[in-house]
Image: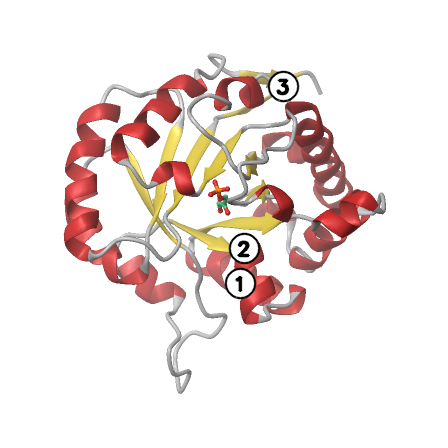
Amino acid sequence: MAIRRPVIAGNWKMFKTVSEAEDYAVKFLEEVKDVTDLDIILCAPFTALYPLKNELEESIVHLGAQNMAWADEGAYTGEISAQMLQDVACTYVILGHSERREMFGETDGEINKKVKKALTVGLTPILCVGENLNLREEGKAVERVQGQVSRALEGLSTEELSRIIVAYEPIWAIGTGKTASSKDAQQMCASIRATLTSLMGLDAEKIPILYGGSVKADNIAELMTEPDVDGALVGGASLDPLNFAKLIINANPLPARVEGI
Ligand code: 13P
């Protein structure tokens, strides 16, 4: 039997100054302080991480970044290392988001190096994968997503694999208001779990797989009923603290996700 604890992560993308982040944290913590049945993560811009460390200390909300370098330190102008993230109490990091792949040219090879580095220092990577509309229409979505998962996780030990989170984010559903149907989300999350199983065996049942793409307070509950959708990575709907808190409360996870294996 494997039990997966649900995860709801907010990805603020390039939004919020320090004062906006601090103001958000105060309001948000008040709303979610009684949530016990899922893990909550806020993935903030680099500049807001240190102030959020202070605001979120001793709270139930975990801190995450949205990217990091694969190198430890050195002449890498503009980069932020895994150790720097740890220094500001980050425990999670989004890696391979489609916006980084598409706009900043990140490759599967680089993402693989970043995943390895994050795991080496003890950060939990939230590995993002997802197909664009053309691939979906051509019937190649599963092939693309499974390939992205395999390439990003190449060379990892079973123990390392057991410490990752995967987020399925179809590019056509990001910021468009077009959510994948819960059945489509389930189908792809199950395909991702099948790939994980081929890499790590039955331990794949323990890996949280999230869905991302226009998740809102009014569609989260249905997504969460799917057996392989263990939570969500939320962009736009995480920007307002009350709205995001409502989404989290509406997620209403089953007491435990129990899969017979
Ligand atoms: P939206 O929730 O705004 O569609 O963004 C999803 C996303 O990219 C989260 O990483």
Between 174 and 57, the one lying in front of the other is 174
Judged left or right of residue 14, residue 59 is left
Q: Residues within 10 Å of mark 3 (few under 14, many from 20)?
A: few
| Residue bearing mark 2 | 97
**Labelled disc at residue 1:** 3
Relative height, residue 3 to residue 188 (above, below): above
Disc 1/disc 2 C-alpha distance (Å): 5 Å
* Mark 2 CB within 8 Å of ligand 1: yes
Residue 27 x/y as whole percent: 17, 33
Q: Residues within 10 Å of mark 2 (few under 14, many from 20)?
A: many
Q: Residues within 10 Å of mark 1 (few under 14, many from 20)?
A: some
Q: Quadrant of the N terminus?
A: top right
Tag 1 and tag 2, C-beta contact below 8 Å: yes
| Identity, as a three-letter code, of the amino acid under mark 1 | Arg
Judged left or right of residue 125, residue 143 is right
- Residue at left 44%, top 61%? 67
| Residue bearing mark 1 | 100
